[in-house]
Amino acid sequence: MKKKLLSALLVATCVVSMAACGSNKTEKEAKDDKIIVGTEAGFAPYEYMKGNEVVGIDMDIAKAIADDMGKELEIKNMDFDGALAAVASGKVDFVAAGVSIDEDRLKTMDFSHEYVNSTEVIVVNGESPAVTPAGAELSGSDLDGKVVAVQQGNIADIWVSNEENCKPKEVKRYTKFAQAAEDLKNNKVDCIVMDQYPAEQLVASNGTLKILDGVLFEDKYAIAVKKGNQELLDKINKVIDQLIEDGKIEEFTANHTQK
């Protein structure tokens, strides 16, 4: 009787073990079939919410990368700084969020080929502009002594915080441009420095705001991956190069900017 009971227990244990192994394999396969992109969906037209879906130029590029690799794209929407921390720690595979290449960032992540040019502008309260260009062109000195709003961790934050570029009274950092816009309308900040495309979207939904004529500075965007992940970087670069060659980046941009 004891032998029969022991045999039954051994059989049950093997069945459970085999089931567990099968389950783990399925989970691993599911993970291998997926690639995760981190982004911040408050930066239209690069990434923004359309209903419950995150869409935009960067998401079209991310989808092209996933398709080329034969993987399902999972989008994780988070704060911009959080997205960069997530890719540096390996919690997401790559970040597509209007990311600029910066020396400090290069210490913890690698970057793809640059795929788009960005133009940084100054947004003011049109009813009571606190910033007026001193000359024919915009310059950093126009921000001297001003309270300047930026997205935390964005290239504008890095640029405005560098005293070689300007000497603001205060740099106020926001995780969302919508809150910066509210503070600008209520004269809690003097201006916002940001990319022109998102600035146009912000002004369109906030009628009292306006973009000053001219360009403050120019930059380029790239995809960020964890430092040392050369295999993934090579695959991303291949897709980006092909998208540029085929004119797809311009097509994606037109799809998300033309009304």
Image: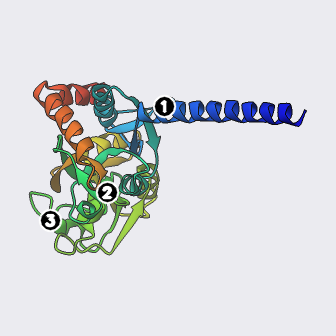
Q: Which residue in the structure is indicated by mark 2?
A: 154
Q: Which residue in the structure is indicated by mark 3?
A: 134
Badge 3 density bin: few <14, some 14–19, many ≥20, Cα 10 Å: few
- The CA span between labels 1 and 3 is 58 Å
Q: Residue at x 37, y 52 (%)?
A: 87
Which amino acid, by three-letter code, is at mark 3? Ala
Badge 2 density bin: few <14, some 14–19, many ≥20, Cα 10 Å: many
**Rendering coords of residue 114 (x, y %):** 16, 44
Q: Quadrant of the C terminus?
A: top left
Front residue of this view, candidates 121 and 30: 30
Badge 1 density bin: few <14, some 14–19, many ≥20, Cα 10 Å: few
**Rendering coords of residue 67 (x, y %):** 31, 25
The image shows residue 233, relative to residue 107, as above or below, that is above
Q: Quadrant of the N terminus?
A: top right
Which is nearer the N-term, disc 1 or disc 2?
1
Q: Secondary structure at mark 2?
A: loop
- The CA span between labels 1 and 2 is 33 Å
**Rendering coords of residue 145 (x, y %):** 28, 74
Front residue of this view, candidates 125 and 119: 119
Between marks 2 and 3 in the image, the one whose residue lies nearer the viewer: 2
Q: Can I make out residue 224 in this image?
A: yes
Q: Secondary structure at mark 1?
A: helix
- The CA span between labels 2 and 3 is 26 Å
Between marks 1 and 3 in the image, the one whose residue lies nearer the viewer: 1
Q: Residue at x 21, y 75 (%)?
A: 163
Q: Can I make out residue 207 in this image?
A: no
Q: Which of the numbered marks, if any, corresponds to residue 68?
A: none
Q: Secondary structure at mark 3?
A: loop
Which amino acid, by three-letter code, is at mark 1? Ala
Q: Are marks 2 and 3 in contact (CB under 8 Å)?
A: no
Q: Which residue in the structure is indicated by mark 1?
A: 30
